């Protein structure tokens, strides 16, 4: 009798296990595929005339996608990301900007569509940039350093360099270069040199003041700086009503050229300065200091380019 009961229980358990369904914890994730390859609305971009480039493609399902545009000569890049199965003018547009330096030039640019969840799916198309976007539109240029102005104030005049040393310049053909050795003289200090550019000495003669908003939160100071490989400390001061009253320090620790954008409110005021008067900025002062510790007297240098104020947001290269 016991044997019959054991057999019956065993058969019952086996039937119960056999009838149990293994349920999925979630949907099966199938990699997306490109069903309509990447295409572009036009194959010559006249950005100076306001052209916008739209991209088109289709996927077999909604998925994450990335379009990367790369200049064949400059290596400039711009990235567009989205999640959808349709890529069109509503979610994939390019107006000629780059994500970071360098900016695009008149060159061929290749656009590549990739899917992060299916790396084997790649689609490409290309276009030619025939004119460049006016990146300075709406900005207040201090200088792009294509020419040296003898009216600029300095102890030892810096040089305007061509694209031979720190190649290529991020803007135009030239950049400004300051260099020297600190911890010399009496008293010894980290000071090397300075350069002051007033509103009247800028590339556009603005008169006494740069034409800036009275709202400090809307104003951005932008400068392109190269890491020369020396222990450089570049102090930038905003001069209001003729006096340097607030500043920032830049110590390059990157490779090549980099765009630095700083909101006016991030500049540190000098002791005793309690007001913010961006509409009273009369000049910009660049002071080259050494980050070497005394009594080291190794030479330091700073290379920078395209100094510009922008409103309502940082400069877009």
Image (cartoon, helix red, strand yellow):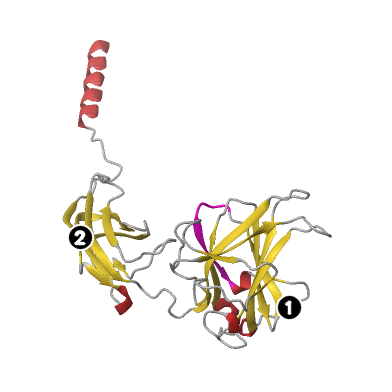
Percent of width and height locating residue 1? 24, 11
The tag on residue 32 is none
Q: CA distance from mark 2 to mark 1?
A: 55 Å
Percent of width and height locating residue 156? 68, 67
Above or below residue 275? Residue 89 is above
**Where on the picture, by quarter, is residue 261?**
bottom right
- Secondary structure of the residue carrying tag 1 is loop
Examine the structure image and report whether residue 272 is included in the region drawn in magenta: no
**Where on the picture, by quarter, is residue 18?**
top left
Q: Is residue 5 left or right of residue 242?
A: left
Count of numbered tags: 2
**Where on the picture, by quarter, is residue 289?**
bottom right
Q: Which residue is mark 2?
A: 57
Examine the structure image and report whether residue 258 is included in the region drawn in magenta: yes
Q: Is residue 223 left or right of residue 130?
A: right
Main secondary-structure element of the magenta-colored stretch: strand
Q: Is residue 155 left or right of residue 197?
A: right
Q: Which residue is mark 1?
A: 274
Mark found first going from the N terminus, 2 or 1: 2
Q: Nearer the viewer, residue 74 or 65?
A: 74
Q: Residue at x 78, y 49 (%)?
A: 295
Percent of width and height locating residue 194? 68, 68
Above or below residue 57? Residue 265 is below
Residue extending farthest to the bottom is 207
**Residue 185 appears in the rendering:** yes
The residue segment tinted magenta is 253-263
Q: Nearer the viewer, residue 33 or 309?
A: 309
Percent of width and height locating residue 305? 52, 67
**Residue 268 appears in the rendering:** no
């Amino acid at each position: 009798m016991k044997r019959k009961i054991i057999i019956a229980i065993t058969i019952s358990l086996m039937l119960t296990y056999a009838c149990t369904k293994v349920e999925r914890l979630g949907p099966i994730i199938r990699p997306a595929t490109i069903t309509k390859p990447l295409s572009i609305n036009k194959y010559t971009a006249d950005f100076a005339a306001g052209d916008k480039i739209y991209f088109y493609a289709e996927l077999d399902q909604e998925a994450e996608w990335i379009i990367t545009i790369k200049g064949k000569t400059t290596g400039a890049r711009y990235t567009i990301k989205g999640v959808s199965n349709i890529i069109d003018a509503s979610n994939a547009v390019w107006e000629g900007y780059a994500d970071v330096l360098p900016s695009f030039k008149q060159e061929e640019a290749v656009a590549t569509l990739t899917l992060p969840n299916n790396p084997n799916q790649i689609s490409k198309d290309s276009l030619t940039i025939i004119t460049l976007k006016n990146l300075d539109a709406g900005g207040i240029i201090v200088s792009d350093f294509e020419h040296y102005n003898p009216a600029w104030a300095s102890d030892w005049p810096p040089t305007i360099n061509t694209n031979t040393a720190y190649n290529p310049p991020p803007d135009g053909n030239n950049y400004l270069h300051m260099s020297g050795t600190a911890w010399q003289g009496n008293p010894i200090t980290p000071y090397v040199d300075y350069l002051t550019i007033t509103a009247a000495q800028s590339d556009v003669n603005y008169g006494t003041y740069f034409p800036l908003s009275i709202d400090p939160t809307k104003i951005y100071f932008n400068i392109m700086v190269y890491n020369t490989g020396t222990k450089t400390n570049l102090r930038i001061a905003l001069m209001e009503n003729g006096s340097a009253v607030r500043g920032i320090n830049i110590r390059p620790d990157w490779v090549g050229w980099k765009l630095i954008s700083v909101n006016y409110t991030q500049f540190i005021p000098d002791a005793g300065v309690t007001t913010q008067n961006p509409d009273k900025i009369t000049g910009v002062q660049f002071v080259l200091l050494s980050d070497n510790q005394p009594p080291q007297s190794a030479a330091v240098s700073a290379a920078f380019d395209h100094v510009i104020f922008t409103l309502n947001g940082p400069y877009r290269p």
